[in-house]
Amino acid sequence: MGIVFRQVSFMGVSPLARVVIERNRSSVEFYDYSRKRAEIGFSKSF
């Protein structure tokens, strides 16, 4: 899920925030995992 704040723009560049949650289930314990991460960055639309 991500959000781009287009109302806050500087020279056509807008900040963005994203949260990613990933879950992989496997019967093999080595391949069974869960990941969570947050990202921030900038976006420019052409």
Image (cartoon, grey):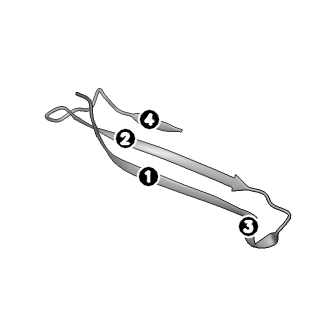
Distance in Å between CA atoms under marks 1 and 4: 11 Å
Query: Disc 3 vs disc 2: which is toward the camera?
Result: 3
Check disc 3 and report the residue beneath it.
31
Give how far across and how far down residue 29 sits, in percent. 81, 71
Which of the two discs, 1 and 4, labels the residue nearer the N terminus? 4
Task: Indicate left or right for 19 with 29 as reference.
Answer: left
Check contact, mark 1 vs mark 3: CB within 8 A: no
* Quadrant including the C terminus: top left
Vertically, is 16 above or below 21? Answer: above
Query: Disc 1 vs disc 3: which is toward the camera?
Result: 3
Mark 1: which amino acid?
Glu
Distance in Å between CA atoms under marks 1 and 3: 24 Å
Task: Say which mark, if any, is on residue 39.
Answer: 1
Distance in Å between CA atoms under marks 2 and 4: 6 Å
Mark 4: which amino acid?
Ile
Which of the two discs, 2 and 1, labels the residue nearer the N terminus? 2
Question: Which of these two is toward me, 34 or 10?
Answer: 34
Which of the two discs, 1 and 3, labels the residue nearer the N terminus? 3
Vertically, is 8 above or below 28? Answer: above
Which of the two discs, 2 and 4, labels the residue nearer the N terminus? 4
Check disc 2 and report the residue beneath it.
16
Check contact, mark 2 vs mark 1: CB within 8 A: yes
